[in-house]
Every structure is written in C-alpha cells, then in structure tokens.
Amino acid sequence: MVNLVVYLLFFLVLAALTYQVLALGCLWGFFSRSRPPSPSPPLPGVSVLKPVKGLEETTRECLESFLIQDYHPFQILFGVKDTDDPLLPVLRELQLAFPEPLVEIVICPENLGLNPKVSTLRQLEAHVRYDLLVIADQDVKVGPDFLSRAAGALQEPRVGLVSCPYRSGPVRTLGAGFEALTIAGDFIPSVATAFYVEGIRFALGATMGITRQALAAIGGFAPLADYLADDYQLGWRIAQAGYGVRLLPYAVETWNPGMGFREYLEHQLRWARTYRVCRPGGYLAYGITHVLVYGALLFLASGMAPWTLGPLGAALAVRAVLALFSERLALQGALPRPYVFLLPLKDLLSWGIWLSSFLGSRVSWGGRAYRVTKEGKLVEE
C-alpha cells in the first residue's frame, strides 16, 4: 500500500512539473505578443463605467489614472450607491480638477440583484454616450495608454470584449503579499495556459472593454444580476453570441496594499468555489498543479528517501522561477524578493483552499454570507 501511494505521488509530481514548465512557456509566449495598435483617427468615443464605494488611501491615485489618458473623446461615469458615501467629496474634487474628460457622478440607489457591481452597472447603462464601453474596478490603476489599447482591440472585426491580466500593486501586509504571490504564481500562469490550450471565453473583471452591440446581444447587464462571477458570465455569454473575446498582453494593477490575512483567505475561497462552478473540468485539473505539496508528500510518504529530494528540489526551483518570471518579467510588478520565500507556505494554503472548496458552497462577500448554486448564482443566506 505504501509503495502504491509513493508511485501515485511520484506521478502527480511529474504531472505537476510538466504543467509548471508548460505554464512558463505559455507566459513567455503570451507576453511576447505585440499589443494591438491604437485606433486611427477619428477616434471612437469610449464610456468608462466605474462602480465605486468607500474611500481608501489609494483610491484617489487609482481613479486619477483614468483621468489622464492620452485618448479623446471619452467620458467617465462614477456610480455611487449612497449619497453619504465618503468618496463623494473626492469625486467632486476630481470633477473640478479635470474638466476633460467628461466626468459624471451618478447616484445608483436601487438594488437590482445580489451582485452590487452589476446593480450599479445597470443603473449607469442609461448614461452611456459612446459605443465602446470600459468597465473598471475601483482599486485598479492603469497606464495613460490603456484606453487607446482597449479601443484599438475593440475595433478589430467581430471582437465584442477585451480584458487584461493584472498584477498586485504595493504590498504592506502579509495578506497582500500572499495575494500578490497567488496572482503571479498561480492565477496569471493558469490564464496564459488556458489562452493557448483551450482559448479564452471568459473575461478578467479588473478591466473589461465591450462594444455596445455585443452588450445588447446578450440583453445588457441585467442577466448577470445574481451571478458572483459576473466577469466570467459576461465573457462566456458574449462568446456564445458569436463575438470574439480577447485577452490583451497589457497588465494593469490592482491596489489593495492593506489586505488582511483573513481577507485573503476569504477572497481565495470565494474565488475557488466560484471557479469550481464556472469551469469544473479546469478546476479539477488545477488540483494537479500543486507540485510543491506533492513533492513534500512524496518525500514524507517514502520515509524521507534520498531519491525524493530530487523531485522536491525540482519542484522548489520551478515554482520560484515561474513566480519570479511572472511577477517581474511578464507582469512587470515590484513585489519585494523576500516574499518569494513565502511561496511554499502559500502553495500549501492554496492546496488546502482547493480541497476545502469541495466541502461546501458558502462564500462571504461584502460582509454578507451567500450560497453559490451549481449555475453560479448567489443565494443570500
């Protein structure tokens, strides 16, 4: 029985090592692709939809990055639910400080579904002026050429949606460090692998560009009202409607430098249970990728046999190379190098979260508890 376990773990280590090398090659190939050219004049107008709530220390800097784009014409719609939101004075200051582009603050008081982001988007939809739309989260920071790149990709024939990979911004807490490692070491490599192995039929929700025609073809934002993974649903539905879904080799930043460790765990479990519902086959295969965990288990199951140090050493090396390549070269992030030493602990946590995702469907989001149905919808508990 012991020998059978050892053989099984050795097979898992080999399979996981193969995946890690494949992911490294896919990352290199994806980020070596040329970015789409900027659209030729006259430039199509772009409407930027930003659901926002609350004021963090990095909020203003993230919002300003959308106001200094080297692109015109475009409008920005800030959707705020409550009239007493502490962010409103900052938004009014930005409105006065940046006469161009057109900045509009829209109060969105209605609860149009369980997904608050989609609820706000539905209320912003009536204020859209242009045929190209960009949806961006509050904590995202972009470069000044972001809109021109997104608009250029959306001008390609039959392209209905574009989105971008992302990296973590500044890191100040342990939870934020683990989040950055997870993005660079797990999530973005898996997306790059999916790009080459099966194609992209989903979106990454930090930033998404969409044509008004494609949005109308799926019935607007209303069908997404009760889905947790609105980005996945948006991309999948647009692909089903016959439009192209593109992932750009352009990384944006998500800023959450003060993320706590508990917040990190809740976010990862919420993502895991959502991913399991949306892409069950891919999520099951994701369990095979945990090479460090299987390498350590092989070492222990073999009675610490010296020959198992080779696979374990290879696992450590390939994980470190993949994480550093992804963070530094592909995503061009600035995660301090000492955080790489947390990679084994992060991988153990990720494996535990993967296992626990099969033990229920309950998630915590915005301070509320929900259950995720097998269709990916939220049910409030």
Image: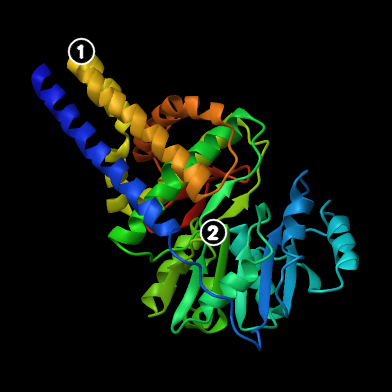
Res. 304 image quadrant: top left
Q: Given this view, does label 1 or label 2 mark the residue nearer the observer?
A: 1
* Residue at x 47% of width, y 66% of height: 34
The residue carrying pointer 1 sits among few (fewer than 14), some (14 to 19) or many (20 or more) residues within 10 Å by Cα, namely few
Instruction: Determine if residue 365 is in view.
Output: yes
Tag 1 residue: 306
379 to 347, vertically: above or below: below
Q: Work out whether residue 362 can be spotted.
A: no
Tell me the colour scheme of the image.
Answer: rainbow
Give the tally of numbered discs.
Answer: 2
Q: Residues within 10 Å of mark 2 (few under 14, many from 20)?
A: many
Considering only vertical position in the picture, is 138 above or below 241? above
Could you tell me which secondary element the residue under label 2 belongs to? loop
Q: Residue furthest bottom?
A: 42
Q: Nearer the viewer, residue 368 or 28?
A: 28
Relative side of 101 to 46, left or right: right
Quarter of the image with the N terminus is: top left
Of labels 1 and 2, earlier in sequence is 2
Q: Residue at x 51, y 64 (%)?
A: 163
User: Residue 13's spot in the image, x, y percent?
Assistant: 23, 32
Specify the amino acid type for callout 1.
Pro
| Viewer-side residue, 264 vs 224 | 264
What amino acid is at disc 2?
Gly
Of residues 236 and 179, the one nearer the viewer is 179
Tell me the CA gap for discs 1 and 2: 45 Å
Label disc, if present, on residue 205 of the rendered structure: 2
Image side of residue 60 versus residue 295, left or right = right
Residue visible at 68% across and 79% down in the picture: 128
Q: Please say if the residues under marks 1 and 2 sit with CB atoms less than 8 Å apart.
A: no
Residue 156 coordinates in the image, percent (x, y): 48, 81
Horizontal and vertical percent for residue 127?
72, 79
Helix, strand or loop at mark 1? helix
